[in-house]
Image (cartoon, helix red, strand yellow):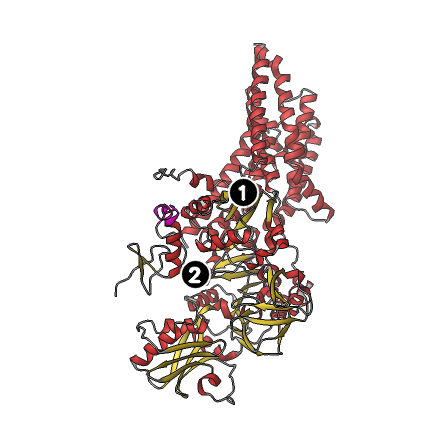
């Protein structure tokens, strides 16, 4: 069999569609190619090979953008003539994407300009408001494969706080360079005339440059130290602030009394390196959000039916008694009662039950489920904030994260005390030996003991590892999470969607043997349906070719029926397939029955397909000595299968509702355990927040994942144990670099105690220690990462 | 050597001028996205064949 790859997205083509001498895997990809080519945007394919993403899935609907209220919240600028919108496009992933999105004006004449922000995966589009509306833009973007992801969360503006740090850093660096130059002449202690007469001028300049450094650039350290002391905590900022104040005070004193040149360059260098470390630690993944809650899971707008007309309204305007129209694959926004005859819903993401729920007219339906049976109508009984599930997720029990003291802060307690003792001892010694040197030596001790290098170890080690993890598909909220992971002793896994793939299953067939002709008929029947089970079965008959059938029909929520050679073939649930209305609908397993002319021939049983590397991962976690638990919202029918593949001492819990999962984690923590939880859906949201570390596993990191400390790309699932091991090693790296920085401190203190800490020595020692620590930490973290 | 006063003051003024220019470019948003411009400048201008 010849293997062809789609020219647009690179996927393997099951059915090859040829157009303009290229092969495509589906009509969607072919259409994007047509659109781009006919608008002279063929360059899209020249920049990268197979730059598109697969268009096999259904296109999205943007009807809610017809509502003016919603649109006005989303626009960045609107003056009736021109509008500007800033959209998040998850599919942006390569230079071709940037290219096509910045050439949108070729696709539509009313688009004026568009600019992409690649790290944030956003595009800012400016367009003529008269004649073009936001909905058309969204539809156009969807057509070329770059549908925007619009959620209510995105309206909140993220303030640019990192700008302040950048400015503080820049001034510190600017001052550092200039002050170093200005202090050079005095290093050499040469008593030349010209030097003496210009000394006051140089010193003045140094002071002027340094004052903003102390009062602006270093201000955050003082504030943090003050806050810590108020709460009786000695964090690392206390000795740092102490060091800065003593440095500044002593240098001023020396200049005013003309007893020395001061330590201006050390002071500036100190602040500069510290801020550099802080800036480095502030890395974020600007295209990911670790704080998304249920609000961004729900749609922004929904269709309301009022006297036979359909109207789009924002989700917060839904009132009790409204009739809503919910289309296929849309999410139910509120609790209500089903008005249509029947419907089926998928609540797996929200409650953890993987089997679709079937409801009939008059049944209560809850918010959050995905609707699977075409278009239905429902009557609203509660508004959004009153829905059962919304109430569940806004519980305040989710908020109890204890204050965490980082490794650095824990060490700083002892550090400060030791330094103060040394300073005291030095003072006492010199008081009895040569009282004139007390100020000199005591202040020198306080200066040199400033834990600049100590404070740099963690930011650089964690920042580096954070970046390396991200490249490998493991995105963490910030560097501190790495330290927390190193302390974990218990790992809890959700089952559905986490241990198992959410979209594919293993299918086994029980019943009369299927001939080739039967397989061909079944495959052809399945072709018309988009139901997840149909798609799964369709793939099951991979090697078989299709055949023409006389008729084929899908009865939504029930099954498929087709006719071949005057025989009626049915696929679906047991009632549909056998015309036996009394047969019980089993809710135990997912089963699709197959019948010919009313006689059941067999059934297809779907069971979860577990992720690759599951056994190895669990074995490795065992080796690391971690206790393993599995929590599931499903029933226990998969238990025997799991017990067979997994090591012996794994704990299982089934039928756990979302709040029961949270309680389970709480119980473990009461036993003193440090828990890492891996989950995927909103049903895990509470448990993820409660755990010491919550990691969301995601097949597509751009789509919603619940609030968590980290996001793990699904294909890297088996590497979880490796990441835990690396976090441990990172902690070791930090310890090693602490030892080195303390060695430097000891050397410095030796100089200080005997009164020989001249400005030159200090100016050499501090940058030297900082640079060597940073290099050491960076090299070590690269080494352990690449040796994994 | 008195000219050193003038030299140093002038060079500091120039340095401060550049510093102010940098700060205003940061406030203007030029440093928000460092990655996209690097790719953008590699795009070729198209030949206007049909004009």
Q: Residue at x 69, y 49 (%)?
A: A233
> Is A45 within the magenta?
yes
Residue farthest to the right? A230
Give the x, y percent position of residue A472: 44, 54
> Is A379 within the magenta?
no
- Residue A715 disc label: 2
Give the x, y percent position of residue A265: 58, 28
Query: For the residue carrying disc 2, how many other residues have a C-alpha within 10 Å: few (<14), some (14-19), or many (20+)?
Result: some
Q: Residue at x 62, y 63 (%)?
A: A690
Q: Mark 1 highlights which residue? A: A280
What is the quadrant of the N terminus of chain A in the image?
A: bottom left
Q: Which residue is drawn at 41% across and 88% down?
A: A598
Image quarter of residue A40: top left
In front: A195, or A141?
Answer: A141
Region rendered in magenta: A38-48
Q: What element carries label 1?
A: helix
């Amino acid at each position: 069999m010849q293997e062809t790859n789609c020219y647009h997205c690179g996927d393997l083509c099951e059915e090859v569609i040829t157009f303009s001498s290229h092969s495509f895997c589906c009509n969607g990809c072919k259409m994007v190619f047509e659109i781009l080519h006919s608008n002279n945007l063929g360059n899209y394919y020249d920049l990268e090979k197979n730059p598109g993403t697969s268009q096999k899935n259904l296109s999205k609907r943007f009807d809610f953008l017809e509502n003016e209220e919603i649109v006005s919240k989303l626009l960045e600028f609107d003056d009736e003539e021109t509008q500007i919108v800033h959209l998040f496009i998850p599919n942006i992933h390569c230079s071709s994407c940037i290219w096509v999105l910045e050439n949108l004006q070729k696709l539509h004449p009313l688009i004026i300009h568009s600019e992409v922000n690649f790290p944030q995966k956003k595009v800012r589009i400016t367009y003529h408001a008269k004649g073009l509306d936001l909905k058309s833009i969204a539809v156009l973007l969807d057509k070329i494969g770059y549908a925007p992801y619009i959620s209510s969360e995105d309206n909140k503006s993220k303030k640019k706080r990192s700008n302040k740090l950048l400015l503080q850093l820049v001034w510190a660096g600017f001052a550092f360079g200039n002050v170093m130059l200005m202090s050079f002449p005095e290093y050499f202690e040469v008593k030349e005339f010209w030097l003496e007469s210009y000394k006051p001028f140089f010193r003045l300049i140094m002071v002027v440059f340094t004052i903003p450094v102390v009062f602006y650039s270093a201000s955050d350290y003082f504030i943090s130290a003050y806050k810590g002391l108020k709460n009786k905590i000695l964090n690392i900022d206390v000795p740092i602030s102490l060091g800065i104040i003593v440095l500044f005070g002593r240098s001023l004193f020396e200049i005013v009394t003309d007893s020395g040149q001061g330590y201006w360059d050390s002071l500036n260098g100190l602040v500069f390196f510290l801020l550099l470390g802080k800036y480095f630690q502030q890395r974020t993944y600007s295209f990911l959000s670790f704080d998304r809650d249920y609000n961004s899971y729900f749609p922004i707008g929904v269709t309301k039916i009022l006297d036979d007309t359909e109207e789009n309204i924002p989700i917060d305007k839904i009132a009790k008694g409204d009739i809503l129209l919910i289309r296929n694959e849309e999410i139910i926004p509120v609790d209500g009662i089903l008005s249509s005859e029947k419907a089926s819903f998928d609540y797996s993401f929200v409650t953890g039950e993987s089997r679709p729920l079937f409801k009939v007219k008059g049944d209560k339906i809850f918010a959050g489920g995905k609707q699977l049976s075409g278009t239905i109508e429902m009557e609203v009984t509660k508004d959004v904030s009153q829905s059962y599930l919304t109430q569940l997720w806004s519980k305040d029990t989710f908020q109890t994260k204890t204050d965490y003291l980082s490794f650095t802060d824990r060490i700083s307690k002892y550090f400060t005390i030791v330094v103060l003792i040394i300073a005291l001892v030095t003072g006492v010694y010199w008081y009895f030996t040569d009282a004139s040197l007390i100020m000199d030596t005591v202040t020198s001790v306080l200066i040199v003991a400033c834990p600049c290098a100590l404070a740099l170890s963690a930011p650089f080690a964690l920042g580096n590892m954070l970046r390396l993890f991200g490249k490998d598909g493991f995105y963490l909220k910030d560097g501190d999470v790495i330290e927390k992971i190193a302390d974990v002793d218990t790992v809890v896994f959700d089952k559905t969607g986490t241990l198992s793939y959410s979209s594919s299953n293993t299918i086994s067939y029980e019943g009369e043997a299927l001939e080739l002709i039967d397989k061909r008929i079944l495959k052809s029947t399945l072709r018309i349906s988009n139901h997840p089970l149909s798609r799964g079965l369709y793939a099951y008959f991979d090697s078989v070719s299709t055949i023409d059938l006389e008729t084929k029909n899908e009865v939504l929520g029930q099954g498929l029926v087709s006719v071949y050679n005057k025989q009626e073939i049915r696929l679906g649930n047991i009632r549909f397939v056998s015309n036996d209305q009394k047969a019980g609908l089993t809710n135990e397993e997912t089963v699709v029955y197959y019948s010919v002319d009313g006689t059941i021939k067999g059934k297809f049983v779907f069971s979860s397909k577990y992720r690759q590397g599951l056994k190895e991962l669990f074995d490795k976690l065992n080796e690391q000595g971690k206790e393993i638990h599995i929590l599931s919202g499903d029933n226990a029918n998969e238990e025997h299968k799991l017990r067979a593949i997994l090591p012996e001492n794994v704990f299982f819990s089934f039928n756990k509702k979302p709040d029961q999962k949270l309680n389970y984690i709480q119980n473990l923590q009461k036993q003193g355990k440090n828990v890492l939880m891996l989950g995927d859906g909103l049903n895990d949201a509470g448990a993820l927040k409660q755990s010491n570390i919550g990691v969301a596993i995601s097949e597509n990191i751009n789509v919603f994942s619940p609030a968590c400390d980290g996001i793990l790309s699904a294909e890297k699932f088996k590497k979880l144990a490796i990441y835990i091991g690396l976090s441990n090693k990172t902690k070791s790296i930090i310890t090693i670099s602490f030892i080195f920085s303390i060695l430097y401190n000891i050397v410095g203190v030796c100089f200080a105690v005997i009164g020989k800490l001249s400005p030159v020595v200090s100016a050499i020692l501090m940058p030297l220690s900082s640079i060597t620590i940073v290099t050491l930490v960076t090299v070590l973290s690269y080494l352990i990462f690449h040796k994994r | 050597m008195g000219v050193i006063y003038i030299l140093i003051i002038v060079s500091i003024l120039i340095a401060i001028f550049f510093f102010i220019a940098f700060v205003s470019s940061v406030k203007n948003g030029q440093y928000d996205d460092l990655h996209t411009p690097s790719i953008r400048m590699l795009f070729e201008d198209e030949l206007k064949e049909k004009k």
